[in-house]
């Protein structure tokens, strides 16, 4: 795909051999596919226009495409191109063969400190790159991170992302367990929300669950507002990791 002049190419479904399903989402499905000429393997995300219109997210999708298409970082999932027909929108995405980070974490329960550190380093590099491009992801969580065949992480799903020439936003988005106080309160926020999510993920890597997780949403909300990090006595978390978490998860 890298060798194809992407901007000059008008893609159609006939350009791909579509294989097995990789996942299912609210607005459509993701399939393994191969570009006919180059034999390059990709993932094709198929979104149904009727569902997009029903939930009034067409503009959100346009923004997602515009942002992700222009990002080039080894730990950000590439969007190679897109096309559409009368009923569907197709996104041509980099294929991450080892699936979702969330599934890997569920399988392992938690990660060893060395592995957690390597993952956080990759994510921090990608987040820093986004912020340099004035992009806020706003929904960093294990479900939105994929793993490629080499074991490298790829931040995906830029559905809540914004490109911010100005410094502040005021929109509730993302997943509660990973949101800072200013977002759950629907207050003005900036790119630091991604740093908060990174700190929450580091805690989850080492402990096996997010720091503010609770059975009831209102309890999670209260824990986020209190912003107190507690570590279980049966898990050994390195002091350096605790320090990094506290520097990211604070308000």
Image (tube, grey):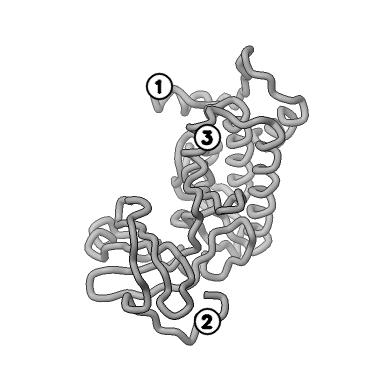
The residue identified by callout 1 is: 215
SS at mark 2 in the image: loop
What is the distance, in whole Å, between disc 3 and disc 1 at their CAs?
20 Å
Label 2: how many Cα within 10 Å (few below 14, some 14–19, many 20+): few
Query: Residue at point 59% right, 35% down?
Result: 200
SS at mark 3 in the image: helix
Where is residue 164? Give x, y as percent: 57, 62
- Looking at the picture, tell me which residue is in the foreground, 43 or 247: 43
Where is residue 54? Give x, y as percent: 23, 58
- Image vertical order of residue 67 relative to residue 96, above or below: below
The residue identified by callout 3 is: 105
Which mark is first along the chain, 1 or 3? 3
- Looking at the picture, tell me which residue is in the foreground, 129 or 15: 15
Asked if marks 2 and 1 touch (Cβ < 8 Å), the reply is: no
What is the distance, in whole Å, between disc 2 and disc 3 at their CAs?
36 Å
Where is residue 184? Give x, y as percent: 48, 37
- Image vertical order of residue 37 relative to residue 90, above or below: below
The residue identified by callout 2 is: 4
Left or right of 128: which side holds 19?
Answer: left
- Image vertical order of residue 18 relative to residue 23, above or below: below
Left or right of 36: which side holds 223?
Answer: right
Q: Residue furthest right?
A: 240
Indicate the quadrant containing the C terminus: top left, top right, bottom left or bottom right.
Answer: top right
Quarter of the rendering containing residue 13? bottom left
């Amino acid at each position: 795909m890298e060798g194809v002049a992407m901007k000059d190419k008008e893609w159609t479904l006939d350009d791909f051999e579509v294989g097995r399903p990789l996942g299912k989402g609210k607005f459509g499905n993701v399939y393994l596919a191969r570009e006919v000429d180059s034999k390059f393997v990709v993932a094709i995300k198929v979104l149904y226009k009727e569902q997009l219109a029903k939930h009034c997210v067409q503009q959100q999708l346009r923004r997602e495409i515009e942002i992700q298409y222009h990002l080039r970082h080894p730990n950000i999932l590439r969007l190679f191109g897109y096309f559409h027909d009368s009923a569907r929108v197709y996104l041509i995405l980099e294929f991450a063969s080892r699936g979702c980070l969330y599934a890997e974490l569920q399988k392992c329960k938690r990660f060893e400190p060395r592995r957690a550190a390597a993952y956080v380093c990759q994510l921090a590099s990608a987040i820093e790159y986004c912020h340099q491009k004035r992009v806020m992801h706003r929904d960093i969580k294990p479900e939105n991170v994929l793993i490629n065949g080499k074991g490298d992480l790829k931040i995906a799903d830029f559905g809540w992302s914004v490109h911010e020439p100005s410094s502040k936003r005021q929109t509730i988005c993302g997943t509660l367990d990973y949101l800072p106080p200013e977002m759950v309160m629907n207050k003005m926020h900036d790119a630091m929300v991604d740093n908060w999510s990174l700190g929450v993920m580091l805690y989850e890597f080492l402990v096996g669950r997010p720091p503010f997780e609770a059975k009831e949403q209102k309890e999670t909300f209260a824990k986020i507002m209190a912003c107190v990090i507690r570590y279980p006595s049966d898990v050994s978390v390195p002091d350096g990791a605790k320090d990094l978490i506290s520097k990211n998860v604070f308000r």
